[in-house]
Amino acid sequence: MSEVREVRAGKVLVRHGAPIHESTLLVEGIICRYKDLSSGERQIQELHVPGDFADLHGFLLKRLDHNIASVSRAVLAIVPHDNLKRITEDHPHLARMLWFSTMLDASIQRETILSVGRRTALARIAHLICELCIRLQVVGLSEGGRFALPLTQVDLADASGLTSVHVNRMLKQLRDQEMVTFRNGIVDIHDWKRLAGAAEFDPAYLHLDFQPR
């Protein structure tokens, strides 16, 4: 690691097609991987939470087919690819863990494709909230179904393939049904069982079981 950077919300960190020589480990905040159209419409492929390598794929690909941007203020640890090369050559276990990280990204993306392609609007929002709750819990940033989520409704819309108006309606429906509230950047889950049921949420794709790797 050679540098720690603090960035504002909405800053593009890696641009599609640009050569890259370092990877980004998220320390604080939320960042995302996304693709967009010439019209400016954006589809968030994955939201990253602290502890995630956002662009580890670039270590081998040397450029990405998507963009990476900060969704909130964020603190980043920048790891040059030369350092990653030494780690993978000298520490096989760490190399496997980095490989696992990229496979977990792929697993999360498969679930996102299912959500955008087949889940109802309500289930999409419910599933995203369940996923983020579990992922933040793993790094100690969610407790008792309550966690900070510094996203706007536009961000949620771009992550779920909905309009911001539709997201607003789904959040109201979830609130009215006393499953979850999202207010002032804080999520409070009131009924996990019903929320997970509405989402058909199964955390198996997050591979949280402790297996030797």
Image (cartoon, helix red, strand yellow):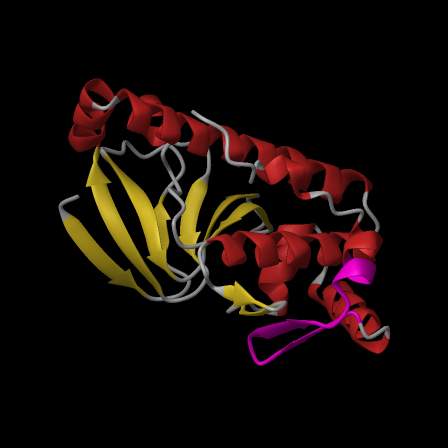
Q: Position of residue 35 (x, y in %)?
A: 53, 42
186 within the magenta span: yes
Toward the viewer: 22 or 126?
Answer: 126
Q: Which residues are magenta?
A: 179-195
Q: Is residue 167 left or right of residue 52?
A: right
Q: Is residue 62 visible?
A: no
Q: Is residue 129 above or below residue 19?
A: below
Tell me residue 72's x, y (percent).
43, 65
Residue 199 percent location from the top left of the image: 79, 52
For the point 30% across and 29% down, the residue is 94
Is residue 12 visible in this depiction of the protein? yes
Total numbered labels placed on residues in the image: 0
The residue sitting at 21% across, 24% down in the picture is: 85
Q: Residue at x 57, y 81 (%)?
A: 184
Q: Compared with residue 3, is residue 189 higher up or lower down, i.e. above or below?
A: below
Position of residue 180 in the picture relative to residue 139 (left or right): right
**Residue projecting furthest to the left:** 2
Q: Quadrant of residue 188?
A: bottom right
Residue 15 locus on image (x, y percent) = 37, 42
Q: Report the quarter where the C terminus lies.
A: top left
Residue 61 relative to residue 195: left or right: left
Quarter of the rendering occupied by the N terminus: top left
Q: Nearer the viewer, residue 137 or 148?
A: 137
Q: Does residue 155 lie above or below 210 as drawn?
A: below
Query: Residue at the spot x=57%, y=69% of the render?
Result: 152
Asked if the magenta segment contains residue 115, the reply would be: no
